[in-house]
Every structure is written in structure tokens, then in C-alpha cells.
Amino acid sequence: MPFTLATWNINSVRLREPIVCKLLEEEAPDVLCLQECKSPVDKIPTERFAELGYTHMIARGQKGYNGVAILSKLPIEDVGDKDFAALGHARHIAGRLENGTTIHNFYVPAGGDIPDREKNEKFGQKLDYLTEMRDWFHSDRPEKAILVGDLNIAPREDDVWNHKQLLKIVSHTPVEIDHLAQTQEAGGWVDITRQDLPEGQLYSWWSYRAKDWDAADKGRRLDHVWATPDISNAAHGSRILRAARGWEKPSDHAPVFATFDL
């Protein structure tokens, strides 16, 4: 069964309902995973999504912060969530498609501005979150699974606009990259985006602070699609919809797509 999946940090699903609908209408992925929904589940604007064919949704939410949701044209079963690092945040949800594929949707903590856990509690929380993800994948190794989301780390040198300048900037520091690598290795996860697009600069996030984000192009690849080895070879067609960063009232993230034939 072929299906296309997209992941997108939407930065408020209610505020940006129009561009979510634009994506659903124009790109029509079978499954859309959203992060940073910033909404209680009962306030997510599901009516218009359902009109567009996305009649299935599983979500975890909280007022004003965090929040993850999976919108799907395909039937999907809620198979739970994990509160990594005991933060009490809505940052993970898992759903299972009828073909047995489990989709994990993650929103890893951003980690604040100072890459030092002694000076910045949020950075410590980020590292602890990744450590607990790693330990979970070690103890319960995933199979026939896809992991997507805003992982808030750009791991490769060509995942950022300037590797040397960003080495001390949260999201590209060596300690974060190491934690992410351990998490990936623990689950045997394959980076699908880079499997399909192995060469060259690749970004999914551009700061709101830039007067002209497109011209400056100081991006980072913070949003990821991974798959377990048993299905990674069934993936293809990865792309990042850069144009969405320029839509009206945009998120600072762009959607990342991949297609799987399972």
C-alpha cells in the first residue's frame, strides 16, 4: 500500500488553520503529522480537515504550548504516548495504520538559548528527553515503524547554513548531535530524508528574525523522517516544501514529505 506522509511544526494549528488546509488541498498527503499545535485537543479545528478527507485524528494537546497531532485519510489507531523526561508536556503520540505501520510523532524540546545544562535548565531537559528516547528504543526496539517530527537538531554539516558558526548554537552543538545519533542508533532508525536526498544543503526551518528569510537562506534541517530498517527501502520521494515557509502568516518550519510503498 503506497502512502505519503508529511511532518510539519505548525506553530499553532488554530492560528494557521488556513495554511494547514492549503497543504491538505494542494499536496494531499495521506497522513500529516503536526507539532507545536498549541491547543487543547478539543479546540483543534477538525471540521474543515474532515471536509478535506482527513476524518481520522489522534492528538495530545495543551493550552498555548507544545501539542502533537496526526491527521489521516487512512484509518489510524491511537497506540499511546510517552512523557519522556517527565516534563508533563504533550510532545509524543503514536498511531498505527491498518497495514501495521506505527507512526511516532515527536516534538523534542528546543533547549533554550544557552548550550549548558548548568546555566540553562531547558538544555538539560532536551538532553534528558533524548536520553530517555534512546533508552526506550534500546529496551523496546521498534519494527515496521516511522518516526517523524521536529527533533530540534540539525545533525549534519550540510543541515545548517554555516557549520562552523553554529557549533555553539543550540540545535547544532556536538553534544546534541551525539545524543541524537545515540537515539537513532538505539532504534536502528534510517534517516529517510537523507537516504533520498544524500547530498547538499537541506533546510526545513528559517528564523522569523530574518527580514528576508528566502534571500538570507540561513536555514537548519530540524524536521525529520526516520524509518526502521525493515521498511526503509520502501521509502522514496522525499522532499521539503520550501514554498510553504513563504505562505501567508507562515510557520517558521516547512513541511517534510516522504512516500512509502508497504
Image (cartoon, rainbow, N blue to C red):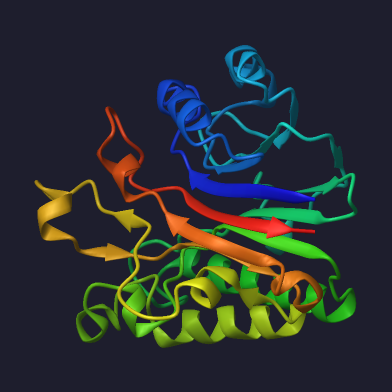
Residue at 56% from the left image edge and 48% from the top image edge: 6
Give the percent coordinates (x, y) of residue 261.
73, 58
Vertical placement of residue 189 versus 242, above or below: below
Vertical placement of residue 67 versus 85, above or below: above
Residue 237 placement, left or right of 203: right
Residue 59 visible somewhere in the drawing: yes
Give the percent coordinates (x, y) of residue 27.
49, 36
Residue 171, located in which quarter of the rendered image? bottom left
Q: Nearer the viewer, residue 61 or 203?
A: 203
Q: Nearer the viewer, residue 23 or 161?
A: 23
Residue at 81% from the left image edge and 75% from the top image edge: 230
Residue 51, located in which quarter of the rendered image? top right
Vertical placement of residue 25 versus 135, above or below: above
Q: Nearer the viewer, residue 61 or 35?
A: 35
Residue 250 placement, left or right of 130: left
Residue 82 visible somewhere in the drawing: no
Picture mark count? 0
Residue 77 placement, left or right of 193: right
Q: Quadrant of the C terminus?
A: bottom right
Q: Nearer the viewer, residue 87 or 204?
A: 204
Residue 32, located in which quarter of the rendered image? top right
Give the percent coordinates (x, y) of residue 102.
82, 55
Residue at 84% from the left image edge and 66% from the top image edge: 144
Residue at 88% from the left image edge and 47% from the top image edge: 79
